[in-house]
Amino acid sequence: MSDALTLDVAVIGGGPAGLMAADVLSAAGRSVSVFEKMPTFGRKFLMAGRGGLNLTHSEDLERFLQRYGAASRVLAPMLAAFSPADLRAWADGLGGQTFVGASGRVFPKVMKASPLLRAWLARLEGQGVLLRTRTEWQGWTADGALSFVTPDGVETVRPRLTILALGGASWARLGSDGAWAPLLAARGVEVTPFQAANCGFDVGWSPLFADRFAGEPLKNVALRLGETTSRGDAMVARYGLEGGAVYALGAAPREAIAATGRAVVQIDLRPDLSLETLTARLSRPRAGQSLANFLRKAAHLSPVEVNLLREAHGLDLPADPAALAAAIKAAPVTLTGVQPLDRAISSAGGLTLDSLDGLALKAAPDILVAGEMLDWEAPTGGYLLQACFATGVAAARQALTRLEQEDRDAG
């Protein structure tokens, strides 16, 4: 690389947002280079594929947008312009035919990320994209060029526009370490401190419960914290509680712990049964059965669920059927801490949405941003990847508009 290189757009960051921006730009005939500091592209994308690569979700767009909380106002037009249906069509076009699972989540049929990523990188190269790995962005030189450290030394490049897609601050070993934040803060860009998102929470389990049930699932439960509710599976961990139903509570537990030091989550172990139906089942004669065996047969509670009830309500559970049903429908579990950021699936914080004009930095209009480095968060279930792809598309389209205007002005 050198300052003399003719380049329309430099994309820094080789994850889904950056690669998608390069895809859109190169398909429009623009010269694009993608610079990635890691030895290979899409490392976090490949990690997501270990669980089947949940690309997006099939629920209606209105409910889909609610998953992004306060950020939905800014993300809504981008998610409408590159919707879950558009993402499925894109994946299908790369040979990763998708299907909708029973939960409404969308996966490629091969249930892996690697075939899709290989086909994607091949298409980018076919469209003329220069793909550079082991090329770590260091900021800007004194005269405004991009500076990179490579195996061959320091190199610079001076593109017409730059798209930053540098990720958040979770999974540092995969490249998302948030090291870019001071570089942008020094240019007057507002950066909110990173926090763990889609993470586990500490619970003061008894040693016996933790030893016996760590790693056991809580299947099809409902969680409630104030006005926030979620539904799905959770997992008992030695340190506390994790899993999709926990992550779907969003920022609420983290914010409650920050404010008061605790968050009391009510767990409904049988959300598909009404209180009345469950009470009727528990009113049957026990006929000499132990309480655990009776609950297994009458309410289909597993051993971990029976013992969770005792953690929540005490060893002596109510004998009255109505009171016992109420205990099953609302087992309080106190969350006392948040697991560390580097153990989180994703991060909250990053560039504030108010610091942007579209996806261009107000403080530096030649720089656009995309992906998880923006201050938004969403639960697992396809929402994270969808927004990364959609913001990558939006950044590329905004860059194309800017380049086309510059070309008209110059012509």
Image (cartoon, rainbow, N blue to C red):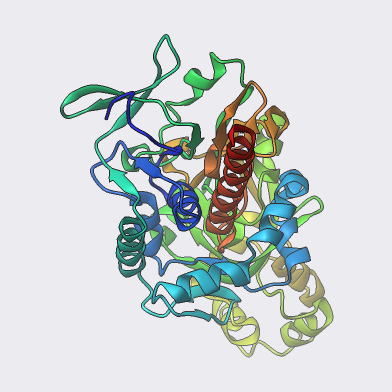
Picture residue at 31% right of the left edge, 39% below the top: 173
The location of residue 330, given as percent across then percent down, is: 73, 62
Q: Is residue 340 visible?
A: no
Considering depth in this image, is 43 or 132 the residue closer to the camera? 132
Taking the view exactly as shown, the residue that stands out farthest to the top is 142
Q: Residue furthest left?
A: 152
Closer-to-camera residue (211/266): 266
Query: Please, is residue 150 above or below residue 320 in the view?
Result: above
Give the number of callouts. Answer: 0
Camera-side residue: 219 or 51?
51
The spot of residue 9 in percent (x, y) is 46, 38
Work out whether residue 259 or residue 342 is closer to the camera in this orientation and state it.
342
x and y percentages locating residue 269 in the rendered image: 65, 70
Q: Is residue 248 left or right of residue 318?
A: left
Q: Quadrant of residue 268?
A: bottom right
* Camera sees residue 237: yes
Expressed as whole percent of the image width and height from the top left, the position of residue 14 reads: 38, 45
Question: Quarter holding the C terminus?
Answer: top right
Residue at image location 41% in from the left, 48% down from the top: 15
- In the image as oriented, which residue stretches furthest toward the front? 411
Residue drawn where x is 73% and y is 30% of the image: 354
Question: In the visual, does 10 lie left or right of 105?
Answer: left
Classify the position of the N terminus by image quarter. top left
Res 363 quadrant in image: top right
Q: Is residue 59 above or below residue 80?
A: below
Relative to 41, 331 lies left or right = right
Name which residue lies at 54% across and 49% down: 392
